[in-house]
Image (spheres, rainbow, N blue to C red):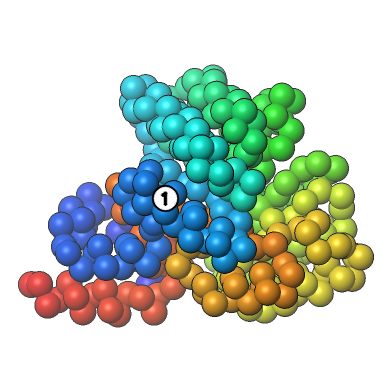
Amino acid sequence: MLRTVILAAGGNQRVKHMVSTLPVSRDIVRRYVAGESLADAVRVGHELATDGLQISFDRLGEDCTDPAQAQATASAYVDLLTRLRDEGLTERAEVSLKLSAVGQALDESLATDHAAAICAAAAEAGSMVTFDMEDHTTTDSTLGILTVLRKDFPSIGAVLQAYLRRTEGDCRELAYEGSRVRLCKGAYKEPESVAYRHADDVDRSYVRCLNILMSNPGRPLIATHDPRLVAIAGERARWHGRAVGSYEFQMLYGIRPDEQRRLVERGETVRVYVPYGDEWYGYLMRRLAERPSNVGFFLRSLASKS
């Protein structure tokens, strides 16, 4: 119930305004977001690289309905990739892209063109791109654009969400040689008709999908902070005879950093998802929904301001 309330708040403009104007919000945001500027992102990237971690940068923003803004986002990603190359970070860093941020809701062909430009910039910089997945209404469109662009940019990563009932089938379709698939639980409010609603059902779906990815020749990108699923992933890798480095763990910036470093010390590849930019509100709400223990501190801070 609490998770549902938080996710609903993520789309409420009045709540957004209240949260955005409170100084306490920035204290919480700093736990999960590198900062608002490209310079902030690069600084955090260097810090993580020093600790032996890989990085996936996400310039925050989604649901764009303005062609000029879609173009601006695409240009910002090209600038990001150029900066990563100049900073010597492209060996460790890729970028994650929400197609809705580059015009997916306006025109699929527009989003495809912008995504292609970003992929071309990544290839030139010696980096890669992963297409983030959003709510279930965009899944077919996102996978369709992925299929088109993988013809020219085969390294593009896909994201699949274990809470969607369709995801096992999508795993089978995408787990081919050279494919990269990030498997996460999912963090959007979805109807029961398309998504599992109970945590145990989501976990069981995650393991079924993990089995498919680990037993096929693609590269599984295991996006979870759940200690049980991390342990299961390691066991499945050994079961299927996978060499360390033929898969990777992925975790969010600011969540379980000690575990991220422990896995690196064990020889695992770990990639940290690093968001940055001023469009942090929706991202913050999804992180709070995933970790309701943060909500008590947040609500107490709000109450102290009233």
**Split into 4 quadrants, where in the image is the N terminus?**
bottom left
Q: Is residue 46 left or right of residue 12?
A: right
Residue 201 visible in the snapshot = no
What amino acid does circle 1 point to?
Ala
Residue 82: % across, % down: 50, 33
Q: Secondary structure at mark 1?
A: helix
Residue name at image x 66 percent, y 70 percent: 264
Residue name at image x 55 percent, y 24 percent: 117
123 relative to 301, above or below: above
Q: Quadrant of residue 254?
A: bottom left
Residue name at image x 62 percent, y 50 percent: 92
Residue 66: % across, % down: 33, 26
138 relative to 289, above or below: above
Q: Which residue is mark 1?
A: 41
Q: Is residue 12 left or right of residue 103?
A: left
Residue name at image x 48 percent, y 70 percent: 255
Q: Observer-nearest residue: 67 or 269?
A: 269
Tell me the crowding category of disc 1: few under 14, some 14 to 19, or many 20 or more residues within 10 angstroms, Cα based.
many
Residue 239 visible in the snapshot = yes
